[in-house]
Image: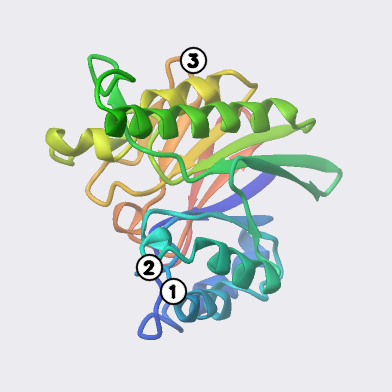
Amino acid sequence: MIRIAAVGDVHVDKDVVGRYRPALEELPERADALLIAGDLTRHGTVEEARCFAKEFGGLAVPVVVVLGNHDHQSDLQDDVTATLTDAGITVLECSATVLEIRGHRLGIAGTKGFGGGFAGACASNFGEREMKDFVGTTEDLANRLGEALRSVHCDALVALTHYAPVPETLVGEPLEIYPFLGCYQLGQAIDSAPTALALHGHAHHGSERGRTPGGVPVRNVAHPVIKQAYNVYQLLSESVDTELAHA
């Protein structure tokens, strides 16, 4: 069994430092790795990235993250990534990593992802250059996520994104903003590999549970949704189970 702790949308700045740490110190007893589904900071500054690294770095378990839209706000995403990497945190962007856990290989492939909408109500790669650029970004990130997922040789495979791959985990959000919360192309990428679990954030008012068209369990782990420091998901068991962790 592999136990994965997961949360997203923690939005760390100097005022948040210390809020999550008591629960994080208990992680070695509860989980084998911590995955964070983007929006690590409020405005994507290097100072906030340092605050995040202080709060979520130096743990006794590996920490793997993707960036979110907030982490791009200041156009310093490369510096944010470098700051986190220097703190021993693995940052994925259309890339993958493999963790060795008690004789098992946990593969994680991740990307921030992008918007675009879902079947029947989605943007198309047609018309103005601005629309083509928008959808082109969505398609490129999804295609590269699929390539990363398919490249991993492991016992259990997890997809980590910020934007949602299915509409079911957006229920509770206004329908009008679904195209800005996720896209069907991410779901297709996840279904292109033997993915065991997909984790995302971004939808603060969404729902926790969904499935891709191919049947992969999807969990929205945005902090406002799970309402605690992290959830724990068990892999290599009969189903994806959830243990409640302390907030």
Q: Residues within 10 Å of mark 3 (few under 14, many from 20)?
A: few
Q: Residue at x 48, y 60 (%)?
A: 245
Q: Is residue 236 visible?
A: no
Front-lying residue, 48 or 76: 76
Which one is closest to the eye, mark 3 or mark 2?
Answer: 2
In the picture of the structure, the residue carrying the numbered disc 1 is 45
First-in-chain label (1 vs 2): 2
Secondary element under disc 3, as helix, strand or loop, is loop
- Residue 21 is labelled as none
- Tag 2, which secondary structure? loop
Q: Which residue is mark 3?
A: 214
Q: Quadrant of the C terminus?
A: bottom left
User: Residue at label 2?
Assistant: 11
Q: Position of residue 16 (x, y in %)?
A: 38, 80
Instruction: From the image, state whether disc 1 or disc 2 is nearer to you.
Output: 1
Query: In the rendered structure, which amino acid carries the disc numbered 2?
Result: His
Closer to the chain start, of discs 3 and 1, is 1
* Place of residue 169 in the rendered image (x, y in percent of width and height, measured from the top left): 31, 35
